[in-house]
Amino acid sequence: MHQNILVTGRPGIGKSTIIKRVVDALGYSKAEGFWTSEIRRGTERVGFAISTLDGQTGVLAHLDLKSGPRIGRYIVNVSDIDRVIIPVLRRARETGKTIVIDEIAGMELTSQSFAPEVRKCLDTCRVLGTLQQRGGSFVQEVRARPDVTVVELTTANRDLMLQDILSLLSRD
């Protein structure tokens, strides 16, 4: 892989799902990093969880947290970003594996360590991840990098995207 591939699209379109499907196809032994997922209480979304490919977990953000930066309705758990995400990204960089980053967005960016670590990961040209569709200056910086290919996931292309991303990976 000689190009970072980042999937963008509206919330709920399936960005994380497509990245998981790509990693399934590549093989988990060839990737390291993290996913995010919803935390639900019944039918209500109450937060977001962090899970690393090697089984570590944390809470990215939750309605019930008492302190931390607020993004929308959620309070972000910066300590779990620093405890779970940053070490797994550093390890992925050092192992030479594909680096899975789900996602580069406002919640993760509340950690002062996240953006510098993402830059180092992107410099390896081995990142497979998701990128917030609209974001601040860091999201725009990432989007503008010459070593980043951004693919937009839509309902029209969702079923074809797995093969498209695998084709991009095999070109490298």
Image (cartoon, rainbow, N blue to C red):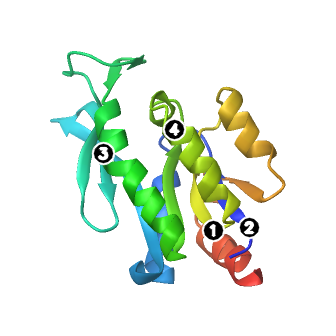
First in residue order: circle 2 vs circle 4: 2
**Disc ID at residue 3:** 2
Determine contact: label 2, label 3, CB under 8 Å.
Answer: no
* Distance between the alpha carbons at the discs numbered 3 and 4: 26 Å
**Disc ID at residue 83:** 3
Which residue appears at 33% of the width and 59% of the height? 52
First in residue order: circle 2 vs circle 1: 2
First in residue order: circle 2 vs circle 3: 2
Kindly identify which residue carries mark 1: 126
First in residue order: circle 3 vs circle 1: 3
Query: Disc 2 vs disc 4: which is toward the camera?
Result: 2
Determine contact: label 3, label 4, CB under 8 Å.
Answer: no
- Percent of width and height locating residue 50: 32, 48
Q: What's the residue type where badge 3 is placed?
A: Arg
Which residue appears at 67% of the width and 34% of the height? 138
Which residue appears at 58% of the width and 63% of the height? 128
- Percent of width and height locating residue 15: 52, 53
Q: Element type at marker 4? A: loop
Rendering quarter of residue 65? top left
Crowding around mark 2 (Cα neighbors within 10 Å: few <14, some 14 to 19, many 20+) is many
Query: Disc 2 vs disc 3: which is toward the camera?
Result: 3
Kindly identify which residue carries mark 4: 11
Which residue appears at 75% of the width and 38% of the height? 141
* Distance between the alpha carbons at the discs numbered 2 and 3: 28 Å
The answer to whether 79 appears left or right of 40 in the picture is right
First in residue order: circle 3 vs circle 4: 4
